[in-house]
Every structure is written in C-alpha cells, then in structure tokens.
Amino acid sequence: MNGRTEERLTGYLFVAPYLVVFVAFLAVPVAYGLYISLHDWHVLGQSRPFVGFANYAALLRDDLFHRALINTAYFALLTVLPGNAVSLLLALGLNARVRGETFFKTLYYLPVVLSVAVTAIIWRWLYSTEFGIINHYLSAMGGPRLAWLNSPALAMPSLGLMSIWWGAGGNMLIYLAGLRGIPDEYYEAARMDGAGAWARFRHVTLPLLRPALLFCLVMSLIGSSQVFGQSYILTGGGPHYSTLTVVLYMYQTGFSLYRMGYACAVAYVLFALVLGLTVVQYRLVAGRREDMAA
Amino acid sequence: MKAGRVALHLAMAAAALVFVAPVCWMLVMSFLPESEIFQPVPHWWPEQPTWSNYIELWKRAEEAPVPRWFLNSALVAAVGTSSYLLISSMAAYAFSRLTFPGRDMVFFLVLATLVIPGQVTIIPVFLLLQRLGWFNTYYALIVPGLSGVFGVFLLRQFFLTIPRELEEAAVMDGCSRAAIYRSVILPIGKPAIATLGIFSFLGSWNDFMLPLIAVNENEMRTLPVGLMIFLGRYTMQYGLVMAAAVVATIPVIVIFLLFQRHIVRGVVLTGLKG
C-alpha cells in the first residue's frame, strides 16, 4: 500500500465514526424535521397527510404562538442587556487590581456550573412568597411580600433575574480577557489628556472591547431566544401564559398534544429567527472590519 | 483614593455574597430538620444540624431513586464524554492533517450546522429514537449528544497549530498515519482535549432537554430531570429537595474547583460557558 492510499484510507476511517453519528442525529433530523413540519403528523394518528405550509400558515394566526414570541422577546429584553451589564461590571471590578481576584472570580462563576434544575430548585425557595428569603428581607425593610413566580406581571422578570444570576459569570470571563488585552499606555495617554474615569471608559475601554461586546451580546441573544428549562420547571409557562416561551410551546405542542408537525413548524420558525440573528452578527462583524480598514 | 479602594473591595464582596449565598443556602437547608425549614425568619445556620434529609433520601430510593439517577448521570457523562473525545479527535485529525477526496466539502457541511439550535432537532431525534427502539435506553441518553459539531471544530483548530515537522519525523521512521494520531497528535493535543472533556462532562451532567425526551422510565432518568420530578413530588419537604440538589451539585463543584484554570481558559478561547 503506498503512502497516498494509506492516507486516504486512514482519512475515511478516522472521519467515519463521527460522521455516522453526525448524519444520523444531526443532518437527518434537520431534514426530517422540515419534512414533518409539512405534514399533519399526530403521534397516534392513522395517517399523516401532507399539508404543505398549512402548519406555518396556522402559526401566523395562532394567538398562543404570538404570545410565546412576545414572551421570549420580553425575556431577551430582560436578560441580554442587563445581564451583560452585570458581567461587564464584574469584569471591570476584577480588572481593577483587587486583592483576592481569583477568589472573587471563582465565586462569581460558580452558578454557571449548576444545572437548570438545581438553579430552579434554589430559586423557587428564594422566591417563595411566605418563606422565601427575598420576601423576608423585603418585608423587614418595610416592603411588600411579592408573589414572584405566581403573578403574571412578575413571573417573567423573576425568571430573568434568576437567569442573570445563573449565567453572568460566563460572559464576565470573556469581558475580563478583553479588558486584559487593552494596553495600559492607552489609559495613561487618556489620563495625560485629562480624561476622567468615565471618559476613559467611554473612549478607551468600550471601543476596544467592541469585539467581545458584540460576541457576548449576540450569543446571549441567541441563547435567550431558546429559553426553556427555567419556565418549564418553575412555572410551566404560567401564570396565564405569562412565561410561555417559544421552545416551551414547541415542547408542549409536541409532547403533550402530540402534534409533531405543528411543533416542528414552531422549531423551524425559531431556527429562522436564530439564523437571522446570526446573519446580523456577521454583518456587524464585517462592518467592524471595514471600520478598521478605513 | 484609599476610600475608593475600600469601597471597590466592599462592592466586590457584596457581589460575591449575591452569587454564593443561594448556593450556600441550598447546602444549609439540606441539613435543617423539618421544624426549622418553615420558619417566618429564615435560618442561615441550623440550630440542630441533622443528616435526616440525606437518610430520608436514601430510604425513598424506591419511589424516587436518587442514587440510581446519580449513577445514570455518571455513566452517561463518563461514557458520553470519552466517546465524544475519541470520535471528535479522530475526525479533527483527519480534517486537519490528512488529504482525501471530499474532505473540505464534508467539513464545510459539518461546520454549517453550528448555526442550528439544538431544540430544532429535538422532535425528529425523539421520533428516530423510537424507531430505532432506543427509547428508554442508555443509547438514547448518550449517542445523540455525540453529534455535536463543536468538538471537531475546536480540536481541528488546535491540531492545525501543531508543527508538521513533528509528523514528518515520525513518517520517516515508518509510522502509519494512525500511529501518528496516537503518538504525536494526541499527546500534543492534550490540553485542548482536556478542556473539551471538562466542558463536555459538565454539559452532559447538566443536560436537561435530551434526557427529558430520550427516556420516560423512572429508573432511566438522569439527575436534572429526576430532580424536577422530585421537586414536583416533595414540594412540601424542601429539606429533602435541597439534599437531592446538593447530591446533584457536588460532582460539578468538585470538577469546577479542580479544573478552574482549564475552565477559565476554555471560556476565553472558545466562548463556551459550561
């Protein structure tokens, strides 16, 4: 066997195990899901007739789906910018040559390694109306006892707050790495020019942190558009559908109502939205490259 | 200036408290006797610490098999992670180092799926698992997770940075390509593979969506979904629920504390978040 044949053969053999799994559980499901979404596919149904885009057309008129879209956008609004602000603040603090930096970093990151189920269990108790620690201190300071998870107005913000606590440490590390990459001379030069702390942040830190900011914001946006476990575990989408998200709606349609065709249509609308966000990200990154070239 | 530094440290400590106190509280509550749990004033420290919640957890293993869920999680995460590292590193080696017809097209196709959110395929994967007869088996809990593109992508990037001279020397010595993978690429790629392994293990241990649809027998559950069922069943016994949550959390906290450096570097290099 000559060298090239051996190389080709080894190549195919080495790619094969991964490729089999990839095709079976990623490539085929992507195509299969699209196929299912074009059918009236009830799990228990005798026949699964082809219906074209009827499932997608029905989604356009489906009030609950609209509700889920709005709720998901609301969750993104509640978590993306505030969450990134928290991450950035923590990173700025860590970058200010504090004592015990590693210690603080470890503690801030800790919640990130918890599962969504553990996070939900902890926060359900924190949010408890009667016995929760949040209401306890709130009422000790003369505030009201709030029904965090049981009132339609507060349920989604409560899930948002919990999600920020859970995830802020991840972006914090990325921001910290970005801050470390900014040379001290820039700050010194700005200081020479008489720039105050805010001016240095606004005109040195923020522009130089732009790639990290862009990355974190877009990844957070994509992540928040897929929020599921928090509302599935803690509120089941309630009260009064106030925490029904797109993925939760897909899950309920598929696994409680067994309407797989309709659920797959929901999944593909979500896919289109995420793809749209990704394209916007690439545009923005490309825009930045042009800025730098100019 | 001094006052500013003190204020900064105080603010950092206050923030640390916000992030850690809830986790500590889970631990404390798991040692509270029932009489101390439903109190108008929360107990931050048990007056009479007790193991009773943990003992009770063990006793209830028939109806809510937390020990079995723990073993399931451990098995799925360990087997899943090692298989994932093996097949991803093999494919990454082929994509980065070997020349064969169709290589770049296949890699492009694989890479293109990075933009597909996991939830999009969850219903077709469920139907496939049913059709394969894998529903309620360990295969269903492990194999779909091995299709993730990220490992191949990350390792390929890393392998591309390994100098070719190292391999050429091995080729001169008459090594086969497979032998080069084992004796050159794997040892040098160790840091990247270890980082990927940690994230893959944590991701598998904490995964919620796949185990939710892959199995429905109580005995086959992994911890995250099991905990949710547990929470639903023992809503009023929160000490017990907290003990179960602690059991599910200890392994990830140990891994986190042991491999912090890997994790920090991994997040920065890859944007992965555990």
Image (cartoon, coloured by chain):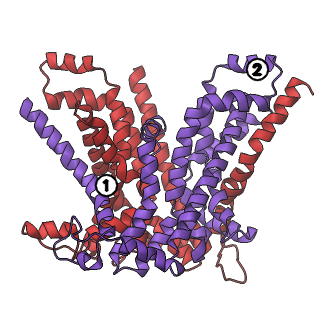
Chain to which the residue tagged by mark 1 belongs: A
Residue B44 screen position, x and y as percent: 21, 64
Letter of the chain shown red in the rendering: A
Instruction: From the image, state the color of chain B.
Output: purple
> Which secondary structure, mark 1?
helix
Q: Nearer the viewer, residue B183 or A121?
A: B183
**Residue type at tag 2:** Ala
Foreground: disc 1 or disc 2: 2
At horizontal 28% and vertical 32% (from top left) the residue drawn is A206
At horizontal 38% and vertical 45% (from top left) the residue drawn is A170
Find the residue positioned furthest to the right.
Answer: A1
Residue at numbered disc 2: B170
> Which secondary structure, mark 2?
helix
Q: Is residue A265 among what the camera can see?
A: no
Residue at numbered disc 1: A165
Q: Is residue A125 left or right of residue B151?
A: left
